[in-house]
Amino acid sequence: MTADDLLVGTGLTARFGDTALFEGLDVGVGPGTVTGVVGRSGSGKTTLLRILAGLAAPTAGHIAWPDGRRPGDVALLAQHPRLVANPRWTLRRIVAEPASIARRDCDVERAALRVGLDPVLLDRYPSQVSDGQLQRACLGRVVVQQPRVVLCDEPTAMLNPVASRAVASLLDDLVADGAGLVLVSHDRRLVQSRSRGVIDLDRR
C-alpha cells in the first residue's frame, strides 16, 4: 500500500461458518497500477472483489477511500456476465447505463468497437448473443463508466485467444489512463506480467 492509493482494504477477513477464506489481508489499489489476485477455486477471489466493490461486508477489517468515494468510482467486471446483465435490456442499454446515470452523453458504438463488439449486436438482448459477446458489452459498460478503480474477475474467461488479447490490451489502456485495476485470474502469467504486486490467496 502507498500514500497515493485510491482504495485501501485493511485487515480484511472473510469467513463462512468455521471456514476462513482469508484473514488479515491488506490491499492497496493505486492509480495507474494493477494488483493481481490468484488462487485456486474457492480460495475467496470473487469474495474479495465483492468486498472491495462494497457489495459484501468483510467478517473483519474495513475498506476506505482515502480521498473519498464518488458515484461511479468503482466498476466490477464479473466472470459470468449473465449473472449481472439485465436480460430485459438490450446490449446498447447495458453499455450506456453508467452514462445515463451520470447524465452525460456517450458514444455507445465507439465503446463497442473499442472492446471488439460489433455495433450490429447492440440492439440485441443477452439471450440473443454469446457469453463472449455479452462479456464484451459489460466491458464496454466499464469503458463508458470511466471508473477510478476497475475490479476484474477472470475478464478473459469467456473469450477466445484473439479476443482475450484484445481485452488484455484494453485493460492496459485503462491503467495507462490512470485507473487502478484489481485483476483476478487463474492465469498466473497474465497476472504476474501486469501487476505491481500479486496477492496469492493459496498462501493466506
Image: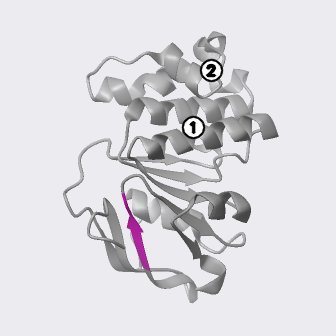
Amino acid beneath label 2: Tyr
Tell me the quadrant of the picture where the C terminus can be found. Answer: bottom right
Q: Earlier in the sequence, mark 2 or mark 1?
A: 2
Q: Where, by quadrant of the figure, is residue 98 drawn?
A: top left
Q: CA distance from mark 2 to mark 1?
A: 24 Å
Residue drawn at point x = 38 percent, y = 46 percent: 178
* Image coordinates for residue 149, horizontal then vertical, percent: 39, 51
Query: Which-is-in-front pick, marks 2 and 1?
Result: 1
Pointer 2 local density, CA inside 10 Å: few below 14, some 14–19, many at least 20: some
Q: Determine whether, in the image, residue 73 is placed left or right of residue 77.
A: left
Q: Mark 1 is on which residue type?
A: Leu
Q: Is residue 191 left or right of residue 8?
A: right
Q: Is residue 136 magenta?
A: no
Using the image, determine if residue 201 lies above or below residue 140. Answer: below
Count the labels in the image: 2
Numbered tag placed on residue 44 in the rendering: none
Q: Nearer the viewer, residue 47 or 153?
A: 153
**Residue drawn 56% across and 89% down?**
18
* Relative vertical location of residue 194 with respect to residue 72 in this rendering, above or below: below
Q: Residue furthest left?
A: 67
Q: Which mark is residue 125?
A: 2
Q: Position of residue 67 (x, y in %)?
A: 19, 58
Secondary structure beneath dot 1 equals helix
Q: x, y (%) of residue 37? A: 58, 67
Give the image location of residue 195, x and y in percent.
55, 62
Quadrant of image for the N terminus: bottom left
Q: Main secondary structure of the magenta part?
A: strand
For label 2, the SS is loop
Q: Which residue is mark 1?
A: 170
Question: In this view of the protein, which residue sits in the foreground, 9 or 32?
Answer: 32
Residue range highlighted in magenta: 26-30
Snapshot quadrant of residue 114:
top right
